[in-house]
Amino acid sequence: MRTTYYTATTLDGFLADEHDSLDWLLSQPNDDDGPLNYGEFIEDIGAIAMGATTYEWVLAHEDGAWPYELPAWVFTHRDLAPVADSVRLTSAPVTEVHAAMTEAAGGKDLWVVGGGDLAAQFAAAGLLDEVIVYVAPVLLGAGRPLFTRPFDLELLEVARNQAFLCARYRVVGARLDG
């Protein structure tokens, strides 16, 4: 069982622009059956975790419908409502939630959907195994960062999917100063 941060970023390392827009991502050509594709990735996922901003973005872009049948944990300190029985709102530490996710996943992998700070919290707790990232040929200059803490990664796989550079990394550990 692995815990993977599967996401897309701009070339300058942003998940979303300053207004939480993903227009930059949705305008890029992508082969749904290409390398490191979402369809094959999600088949092995048994539970997901995301932050409140990601949760609200998903709902806004799915017309309020929840697109996942998988158990989902939404990390938040906001006053949000779960939109499906599979959604659990939490402000618990990632270590507690990871244990619950692992149990709920039934031997399948875990997906940290976003954002960058949540993924970094999983990594800091030693609970993030991989990062799979689609890098778009876009520069935003500012926005929501891909990751919020310094970490070393090991490149395991690289490919091209139309406009995207696709890469899979193993999380090595926190980057030590000096």
Image (cartoon, rainbow, N blue to C red):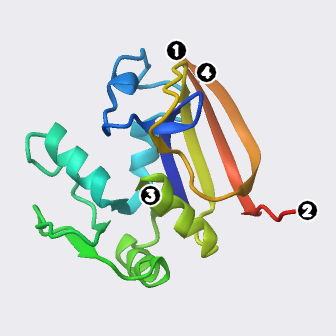
- Going by the numbered disc 2, the residue's amino acid type is Gly
CA gap, disc 2 and disc 1: 39 Å
Q: Which mark is residue 160?
A: 4
Q: Is residue 7 left or right of residue 56?
A: right
Task: Judge by depth and name the residue closer to the eye, 170 or 17.
Answer: 17
CA gap, disc 2 and disc 3: 32 Å
Q: Which mark is residue 144?
A: none
Q: Residues within 10 Å of mark 1 (few under 14, many from 20)?
A: some
Residue 152: where, in percent of width, then height?
Answer: 76, 55
Q: Which mark is residue 111?
A: 3
Q: Residue furthest right?
A: 178
Who comes first in sequence, dot 3 or dot 4?
3
Q: Which residue lies under the disc numbered 1? A: 162
Residue 92: where, in percent of width, then height?
Answer: 37, 82
* Point 53% across, 22% down: residue: 139
* Pointers 2 and 1 in contact (C-beta within 8 Å): no
**For residue 166, above or below residue 1:** above
Please tell me whether mark 4 sits on a helix, a strand or a loop.
Answer: strand
Please tell me whether mark 2 sits on a helix, a strand or a loop.
Answer: loop
Quadrant where the C terminus is found in the figure: bottom right
- Going by the numbered disc 4, the residue's amino acid type is Arg
Q: Residues within 10 Å of mark 3 (few under 14, many from 20)?
A: many
